[in-house]
Amino acid sequence: MPSTQDPSPPDLDPIISLLTTYNELNPSLVDEFIESPSALEFMRYVARNRPFVVRGGARDWEATRTWNVETLKRLLEGQSVNVAVTPKGNADSPTLNEEGELLFVKPHEEQQPFDEFVDYVSNQERSGDKTGEVRYAQTQNDNLRNEYSTLFSHVDQDIPWARIALEQNPEAINLWIGNSRSVTALHKDNYENIYVQIIGAKHFLLLPPLFYACVAEAELPAATYVRDEKAGLVMKEDGGGEKVPFATWDPDGGVEGSGTRYSRLAEPVRVTLEKGDMLYLPALWSVSFFPK
Amino acid sequence: MPSTQDPSPPDLDPIISLLTTYNELNPSLVDEFIESPSALEFMRYVARNRPFVVRGGARDWEATRTWNVETLKRLLEGQSVNVAVTPKGNADSPTLNEEGELLFVKPHEEQQPFDEFVDYVSNQERSGDKTGEVRYAQTQNDNLRNEYSTLFSHVDQDIPWARIALEQNPEAINLWIGNSRSVTALHKDNYENIYVQIIGAKHFLLLPPLFYACVAEAELPAATYVRDEKAGLVMKEDGGGEKVPFATWDPDGGVEGSGTRYSRLAEPVRVTLEKGDMLYLPALWSVSFFPK
């Protein structure tokens, strides 16, 4: 982990030199395709470990064409779904507790009838409510082929350029539903992601793997929100002393960590996915996103 | 540069852990194609930064079908070529001087009539001479499109899978001619290479870029062999104090450096190219080779 007490003067620090050179050689923007790439074009990005966007890549999916609150409620009538509940949208995020200690806090999870969940999410958005609890369907357990399997036939069964190039099918296909208070904190996955925007739009902030030195990863005590009848959602530290390694730096200047001596060198890539767009993100890139 | 005085105990040393994990995940052998790969298949190797061999990939080249000492002498009749001359085949190699100091020694270079050069090389091979000076045509200045341009039409103008995948043509195409005493010491290039064996066979030893920690790179004073009328080829240190960063570890146990505390973890990939075979080697892999 990078130390803020590193004794090397900046002009001799090899990490500063490395990050500065990376910035000089790589634009802090994302390439855009206006039609699906070939498998070979895709592999060129895999080889260089760079993300790209396909504008309108999922424009013709049945999901993109037909989903809205009403159609989803009809399709999922009578079903209940897993919902992540937090006081301010901070599911799986570094959060200060009342003692000023930074914890990695997981949401309270509960099953809710889908129609109640989606009405809550859309009514909160429409009303501009900035204080009520935030509900976010965000499981990552291949939910579109399980919990939401009745919707699965509405997305293309395949993203051919990825399947042909990588010679494998997706390990998990997840559907996330939230509103503008549903934030996903800066984190990294050790696998590749393809994000597809079906409804609305979302802002992404991306950092290349090399900029690990900027994100101030720390071993945070794990905690979970619990519903308390009187106090509402209360953060409770998990037993067993489990620690979660997680980025504590917020490139947009949140209240958490203040970063490392390298954070000022980060030039985050920002991109907005509109309805029907796709984003390929290589493994180990750091990413945060929030709805537009 | 890795230090042999690193104080971390082996079980806590992250470099040992990294190299051991790499060895567990990657076989120390090279994949083999028996026909040319597609551009997409090639890009899969580029993306994983792994080498491969195409057996017989240049089998049908006019060069492979027709070149031998006699045809080459006829094609290059009356021409003279650049020849690297060393006492024991150690062109561009770490070599101990008489004071026991390790220098990076460049060959004596001279122009020789091609027929004299190639007769010397083949006669030395046939006679089993192990003591006479070693002559090696090994310029790397795109010589097949310059010095040897009369031979250029005998090789395919293009390696389609590489051109299509990388969207560029080779920056340099070099022809090397030597015998079994012409050794190329462990080194790395900051660009990709495709080696094509036209006559004879050659043993390659390859180390992934991660194993930089094993090669004991050192800043060696630069020297050059000079022909002295009485003493023969004499190593002369270059003026100006120029230093060359170069691997000093010989994985096959030469007399030079003894490696680093990490060298024992290296599992070099060994592969032999026979007549008509090709080897793709990604940038920054360390490589040494010598004729079979």
Image: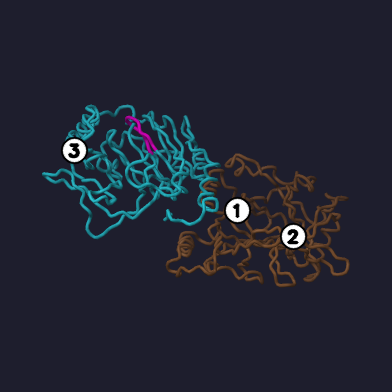
Chain colours: A brown, B cyan
**Residue type, label 3:** Gln
The answer to which of B230 and B68 lies nearer the viewer is B230
Query: In this rendering, is residue A69 above or below B210?
Result: below
Question: In front: B131, or A27?
Answer: B131
Determine which of the numbered discs, if any, sits on residue A106 in the image: 2
Q: Position of residue A261 (x, y in %)?
A: 53, 69
Q: Locate residue A117 relative to residue A223 in the image: left or right.
A: right
Q: Which residue is disc 3 drawn over? A: B79
Residue at 73% in and 69% down: A97
Percent position of residue B94, x then y: 30, 47
Please check whether the numbered discs 1 and 3 fall on a single chain: no
Report whether B268 appears left or right of B93. right
| Amino acid, disc 2 | Lys
Q: Which quarter of the figure has residue A233?
A: bottom right
* Disc 1 secondary structure class: strand
Tag 3 subunit? B
Q: How far separated are the C-alphas under marks 1 and 2?
A: 24 Å
- Magenta region: which residues? B195-204
Q: Is residue B221 above or below residue A39?
A: below
Residue A281: image tag: 1
Query: Does residue B204 appear left or right of residue B230 in this picture?
Result: right
* Residue neighbourhood size for the residue with mark 1, other residues' Cα within 10 Å, grouped as few (<14), some (14–19), many (≥20): many
Chain under numbered label 2: A
Mark 1 chain? A
